[in-house]
Amino acid sequence: MAWAAAAIALPLVLILLILAVRVDIIIEKHKETGIKVYLKVLGVSIGREKEDRPGRKKKKPAVSRSEKKGGSIFNRIMKAIGLSRVESGGAIKKSLLHDGAGETVRETAESVMIILREVFSAVRHVRVNRLEIRSVSAGEDAGQAALRYGIACSVLYPLVGYVMSGGKVNRKKTAVDISCDFEAEKPQLDLDITLSLRVFYAVKAAAGIVLENMKRKTEGEYAA
């Protein structure tokens, strides 16, 4: 009996430990690499290739078996969260021709609302371990540069203020620098953001999105 109880308890304990682990979501954008998003769990990076690091040349990605058979992981994710209608220009065109503009907009809006509801529910449990933003506005002339600077200020400052008001922010690793360079031709944006979230809340949000979309799909099939 003791062995049987241990065999049942051990997997449950492991699952609880995994759900309690914090996952770091790292968002980086630099001049050389562009925007990169990857995860770090217990010090191990997931989704960050060596080619993603500054100064490294990018290699052409190989086509996986899953992409050859049933589409890429991106396509499957978009389908699971109810956004397959708008995953590409071709998908949008197909949906408009098959279902019409009204149905396409309604279905997409419902999926987006489900996603936002679950995401905002999870955001309450997010910790901001690092928040470094450097924005340099520029343009072909002084007027365009000033306009872009105004847009950057109107977007970034309220967003950062909202994040800071949440309280779960490492203020020692927070730096926001928004400036304007009238001599440069191209704007520049550098990001170094690290968010931390327990696996439980991420799984809960993802499951909520997928299950709600499955429910909507089933109800739609019965209605038809």
Image (spheres, rainbow, N blue to C red):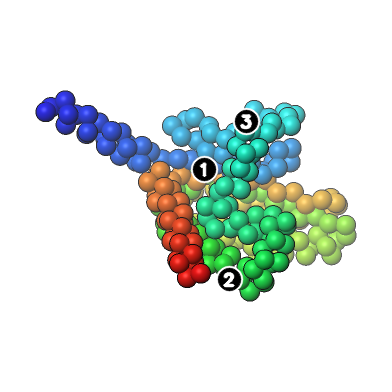
The residue depicted at 47 percent of the width and 70 percent of the height is 223
Tell me the mark number nearer the camera, choosing from 3 and 1.
3
Q: Nearer the viewer, residue 202 or 102?
A: 102
Which is more N-terminal, label 2 or label 3?
3
Q: Which residue is under mark 3?
A: 49
Q: Which of the image's four quarters has the N terminus?
A: top left
Q: Nearer the viewer, residue 70 or 79?
A: 70
Q: Nearer the viewer, residue 119 or 224?
A: 224
Give the amino acid type for the residue marked by disc 1 in the picture: Ile
Q: Which residue is under mark 1?
A: 25
Q: Give the farthest residue toward the right.
A: 141
> Label 2's element?
helix
Q: Which residue is under mark 2?
A: 106
Q: Position of residue 195 (x, y in %)?
A: 50, 46
Q: Residues within 10 Å of mark 1 (few under 14, many from 20)?
A: many
Q: Is residue 156 left or right of residue 161?
A: right
Real-space CA distance between mark 3 and mark 2, rounded to the nearest whole angstrom? 38 Å
Which is more N-terminal, label 1 or label 3?
1
